[in-house]
Amino acid sequence: MLDKRYQTLISLAETQSFTKTAAQLFITQPAVSQQITSLETELGFPLVIREHNHISLTEAGLKLAKFAKQMDLESQKVINSLKTGTEHLKMGCTLSLSSTILPKFIQQLSTRANVVTTKINNTQHILQNIRDGKVDFGLIEGNFNKEEFDSFFVQKEDFVCIASNNIGGTTIEDLFNQTLLLREPGSGSRNIFENWLATQNYRISDFKNVIEIASPSAIVELLKQDQGISFMYQSLVTNELKSEQLKKLDLTGFHVEHPINLVFLKNSYFKETYREIVESV
């Protein structure tokens, strides 16, 4: 278990307030200040900048709080695993992968561990869940900070333009008069498409009409109703393409593959466990 002073530092990094930290930890405000001062004295460098009635953590303070939080989360997991003799895994997955890759992972994990939680949301939410310890790892297709997170490659996915059979076009410019069905900000697939558009010196706003929809399955249904075009992983519409309910538009210059990764906190104690999971699937 962590020294209570580090628990106080973690809370202070989150609240940026001695008063709120005291309330969160059910101790007095002078006790919070005393614990932080004691830690600073022991370490030999400042953790907090005190300016009148405002405080902020130094860069060293923020880094130490982040490290202490990870150690606290993982130590609790190790202790629980030792007590029960079973790995209890909390897993996150992005919406775009929940109907394709996720079932395969759960099936494999059920033979070696107890999957107690599966959170499904967009990339940014899953990454925040990993930071907060709400999930141990996440299956994501979006970009992530490699200084903060580590990962194992799972597979590559083709990212394509999908439309109904009534819509045609050979270039991205041909599609600007169409309605673009797009995931919400924070989703990995939206980030991939926006990044590609930027390489062509275009933006989302170049499309005549843009509709944001959080559900990939809802986007597929609207495409089948001839309500616009979208950019997504081909595996999401495998059946619709085979049955010719939808079609893939092969646009000039648009050839995008994107890696799917199993992502977790950098320097995690459970890195080898995550490696074994990927290798078993």
Image (tube, rainbow, N blue to C red):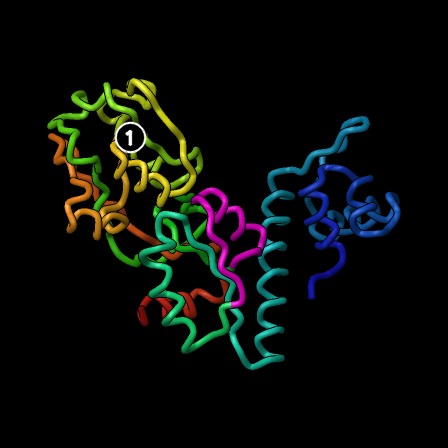
Q: Which residues are magenta?
A: 116-135
- Picture coordinates of residue 181 (x, y %)? 33, 31
**The C terminus appears in which quarter of the rendering?**
bottom left
Q: In which quadrant of the rendered view does residue 231 lie?
A: top left
User: Residue 216 versus residue 150: which sits nearer the camera?
Assistant: 216
Pick the front one: 201 or 122 = 122
Q: Residue at x 47, y 60 (%)?
A: 91
Q: Per the image, is 152 magenta?
A: no
Compare residues 163 and 173 and report the one nearer the observer.
163
Amino acid at the residue labelled 1: Gln
From the viewer's perspective, is residue 93 above or below residue 171? below
Q: Secondary structure at mark 1?
A: loop
In this rendering, position of residue 163 left or right of residue 62: left
Tell me if mark 1 has few (under 14), some (14-19) or many (20+) residues whose alpha carbon lies within 10 angstroms of its own: some
Q: Which residue is mark 1?
A: 227
Residue pictured at 43% horizontal, 33% vertical: 185
Residue 66 horizontal/vertical position (percent):
59, 49
Quarter occupied by residue 143: top left
Name the residue located 60 percent from the left edge and 39 percent from the top edge.
59
